[in-house]
Image (cartoon, rainbow, N blue to C red):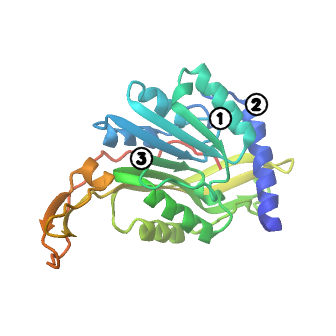
Amino acid sequence: MDKRIEKIRAEERRYHEACYDQYRLFEAGSWLYKPVRTVMDTLAVLDSRESLFVLDLGCGVGRNSIPIAGKLQGRKEKVVCVDLLESAIAKLEGYSETHGVGEYIEAHVCDIGEYEIAENAFDYIIAVSALEHVESERKLEQVLERMVRGTKPHGVHCIIMSTNVHEVDPFTSEELETYMEVNMTTNQAQACLSKAYADWELIFTTLKPLEFTIERNDRLVLLQSDCLTFVVQRKYTKRVMAHTVQESGNPAFTDEEREYGFVLRWVRFNEALPLLEQDQPAEAVTPIPCKESVKT
């Protein structure tokens, strides 16, 4: 890891740990006051599922993951939470017990840029103010690839990230050094996401300018950025699949084929059948504007 990233990570650690110590989860006065509305409302897309497995990348102390676990109690579910800060994960585990959802939370201390996501494991993946904190644009692309591979058919991703970030002196308007690992322009970020989700269905996207004051290096800093919200759903493609088998043999069904009811057609040895695909329409969700401030 280069010196620049180490410097940014050290300052981000100081900022977040100070915030977590000063404010309790769901206490008024900070962005920890309540979950992000878009994250919670997007759950409606998945209401029909009997079981729900959620991944919260950059979970912090549980601002979103604890309300998700609370809303889904009674189902077979698990909310997997990943954050770089040991102190954040420790507080998350404490808060989850306090709010009665500890059994639904699985917490990991890990850089989200290095976290391995199991294939086809999750129904819902959220990344709120997280992806811009990986160490490079290439690492961001790799994380998105893992997120895509780790999602079940009809699964949903909710991404909220800061783009076009500037830090300025609030009194002199002097441009200051920007403490952001991946500071993409808004157009660059939109292009990156569009490429990663080229064959997914876009449910909702919005862009909102944000501006607020934080303390950085013992001075007040005005933080300006665009808040990009991007909610997408994986299309479920039913396939008519050809299994080349011996006359007396039977094709082996995969777990995915059993679970999602792929239409299978048995064919005799050496017969050819083209692979056909038929896209099924995704469920709709009412667009919800990004009204909440998000952490940086």
Please name the residue shown 75% across and 53% down the image: 170
Coordinates of residue 214 in the picture (x, y in percent): 74, 46
Disc 2 crowd rating (10 Å Cα; few below 14, some 14-19, many 20+) is: few
In the rendered structure, which amino acid carries the disc numbered 2?
A: Gln
Question: Which mark is nearer the camera, 2 or 3?
Answer: 2
On screen, residue 262 above or below 106: below
Labelled disc at residue 216: none
On screen, residue 47 above or below 103: below
Q: Nearer the viewer, residue 282 or 237?
A: 237
Q: CA distance from mark 2 to mark 1?
A: 9 Å
| Circles 3 and 1 in contact, beta carbons < 8 Å | no
Mark 3 element type: loop
Q: Which residue is mark 1?
A: 30
Q: From the image, which quarter does the N terminus lie in?
A: bottom right
Q: CA distance from mark 2 to mark 3?
A: 29 Å
| Left or right: where 273 falls relative to 134 | left
Q: Which residue is mark 3?
A: 289
| Left or right: where 52 falls relative to 267 | right
Single out the residue that lies furthest toward the right: 218
Q: CA distance from mark 3 to mark 1?
A: 20 Å
Coordinates of residue 40 in the picture (x, y in percent): 43, 37
Q: Which residue is mark 2?
A: 22
Question: Which mark is nearer the camera, 2 or 1?
Answer: 2
